[in-house]
Amino acid sequence: MKSENIMKAIEGKRISLEDCKKIFHDALENPEELFWASQQLRKKFKGNAVTFSKKAFFNLINLCRDSCSYCTYKAEPSDGKASMMSKDQVMQLLSLAKKYRCVEVLFVTGERPEQRYTQARKWLNENGFKSTAEYLIHVSEMALAYGMFPHTNAGNLETSDMRELQKTNVSLGLMLENVSDRLTEKGMPHYLAASKKPEERMRILKNAGTLKIPMTTGILVGIGETPDEIINSIFAIKNIHQKYGNIQEVILQNFQPKTDTRMHSFPSANEEYFKIIVALTRIIMPEMNIQIPPNLSPKSYQSFLNVGINDWGGISPLTPDYVNPEFSWPAIAKVEENSNDAGYELKCRFPVYPEFFSFISKQLRNKMKIIGNEERMVKEEYWK
Ligand code: SF4
């Protein structure tokens, strides 16, 4: 006999925030019912496909005006890894990415580095750009000219910059992280990160919604949040999507401590807790594309296929995960083998999901058609 709230989820009836909090607490005792329900919904809405995006990670600049307690990506000018990737370096990596038949060009930067660092301002000035965002617009055009598809994740972008990037980027990324203000208080992970203030992140996601930009967002799981805070965060994303319809994907990223950070001795996210959050996200947003990064659960990522995920996110055959450099991506062939063994078919998607193609320009859609198939996925002969 399934519980009333689980049956409501299965039958597509509205489940409230309070219902979800009850489901979470029941799952701590016995998660099987929740895992079963998440699988039913996953099968109903996503069939037996699991997707990924074949990408190259372009780490434009590690400087960042903020400081999150868990971040090893941010560098200081004295670290020797803080210079802007030049146009020539971008061109060289684009050429290599094309050889590897990457589809997505992921551009990542710290949060508006020029607002804090003379070095970044100087480089931008000398190279004819007013801001990092303006440089991102330029390199996105370069990527598109190579027949690959940019997806930019550069923190809180101005609306005018998003409007320009929308011309070349088939989607943009911005993690909500968590909607709790408590995590921005003194001693908490986002205390020194103004851009991570929940109202700021929500504002950007809403602006992207107004612009009809397909957005990838998500939550960082295990950074000291309470279960209620994480459930509130999933509902916050759901509410944005209900209003604007532009959230294409939710990433659930499990916290892994980094040795050189303030949170170095904080424990990794507990796997059972993480699975409950993943399954709960499927219950709250049954039709959503839900991703976990396979490199952050290297020994067990395939087991997440049984708790509701339908995407592995970007996997690069060429570049490291600069945000989690100690976790290399598994080989795509291995991900395919593990997905098949679990009963799923691996498909390569564009950095925009098929159901959001109508959000992007005809010009971009026509470029995707060259390597796309009738399912609006990437042709197998291109990515394999
Ligand atoms: S997580 Fe992002 S915003 Fe925070 S310090 Fe690192 S690069 Fe900056």
Image: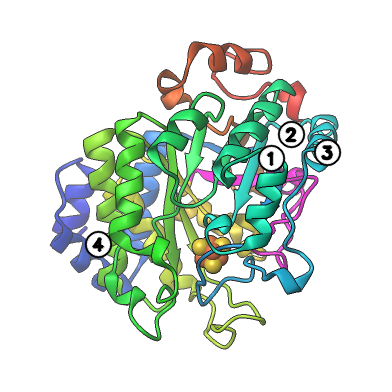
Q: CA distance from mark 2 to mark 4?
A: 36 Å
Query: Mark 4 packing: few (<14 Cα in 10 Å), some, or many (20+)?
Result: some
Rendered residue at 56%/34% (across/down) = 351
Type of amino acid at the residue the image marks with label 4 = Asn
Q: Which residues are magenta?
A: 310-337
In the image, taking residue 23 as reference, residue 380 lies left or right, namely right
Residue at 71%, 69% (x, y): give it: 77
Q: CA distance from mark 3 to mark 2?
A: 19 Å
Q: Nearer the viewer, residue 140 or 272?
A: 140
Instruction: Identify the residue under disc 1.
Output: 55
Specify few, some or many for label 2: CA neighbours under 10 Å numbering under 14, 14-19, or 20 or more: many
Left or right of 308 in this view: 262:
right
Q: As shown in the figure, which amino acid type bears the numbered disc 2?
A: Cys
Q: Does residue 271 lie above or below 55 as drawn?
A: below
Percent x, y for residue 373?
61, 16
Disc 1 is placed on an element classified as strand
